[in-house]
Amino acid sequence: MAHMHTLIEDLVAANRILANENVVDAFGHVSVRHPEDAGRYLMSRAKSPELVEADDIMEFTLEGAPIDSSVRKPYLERFIHGALYEARPDIQSVVHNHSRSVIPFGISGEKLQPVMHSCATIGHEVPVWDAQDTFGDTDLLVSDMSMGRDLAGTLGSGTCALMRGHGCTVAGRSIREAVYTAVYLEINAELQWKASRFGKLKFLSPGEIEKINSRLGQGKSGEGYDRSWEYWSHRVGIASMRR
Ligand SMILES: [Zn+2]
């Protein structure tokens, strides 16, 4: 159970970090797959991420049913998480957020692509999921598994998907990787928007993206991810050990 304790500590830290780095605000959430049961995941009860404590963490089936019988209210959009874990056995952590800079790319037809080496994990071109394509007029929130599975189809084998008029979803092979990609997705969107004033942009090539990502992922959990995790943890007052 020591591993579970550490994982919950990291999940709480991830909530605080994502809030501090302006990825989530009052809304948005992060989850991790259960370490001993691939058919379950862990996520906070419905609460602003900056305020999440270890006691808030709940366990869910991939269909989004809470395992415990408490009356704690889960996030409405938890189906995003279960549907991605169902579609992608390689994924261990999911972030969903509505950060400001990604929104313009989901509504304009302007493609979001990596502009800087630190942003290579977002992939060559971030796909856009539009709930209206399949479900017509909705409140845009992913409120059941059919919407979650549709979104997972758009994300495909990548790490990110934008959601038209809503936000984005990011997947990673670890909490640290998912947090890293979520932070740099927001940074990339801001930089791309600023640079676009100068005219035509030169994005990272697919070959550059591949080389950067293979270096980042080296080591036990990815040295590059550990270094940023240490830094972001320090900024929220959490002492972090490299693992
Ligand atoms: Zn949302």
Image: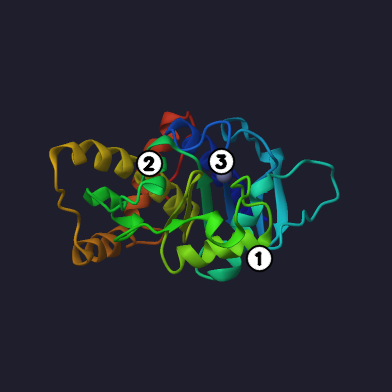
Q: Name the residue under label 2.
A: 104
Viewer can see residue 34: no
Q: Which picture quadrant has residue 159?
A: bottom left
Q: Which amino acid does label 3 sit on?
A: Gly
Helix, strand or loop at mark 3: loop
Q: Name the residue under label 1.
A: 36
Left or right of 232 on screen, residue 153: right
User: In the rendering, at what x and y percent does residue 18 appear?
Assistant: 48, 38
The answer to which of 72 and 14 lies nearer the viewer is: 72
Q: Residue at x 68, y 56 (%)?
A: 1
The answer to which of 229 and 48 lies nearer the viewer is: 48
Left or right of 184 on screen, residue 35: right
Between circles 3 and 2, the one closer to the viewer is 2
| Mark nearer the N terminus (3 vs 1) | 3
Viewer can see residue 114: yes
Where 1 sits versus 206, above or below? above
Residue 225's disc is none
Residue 28's disc is 3
Left or right of 6 on screen, residue 180: left
User: In the rendering, at what x and y percent does residue 42 appear?
Assistant: 65, 53
Q: Residue at x 54, y 45 (%)?
A: 10
Q: Which amino acid does label 1 sit on?
A: Glu
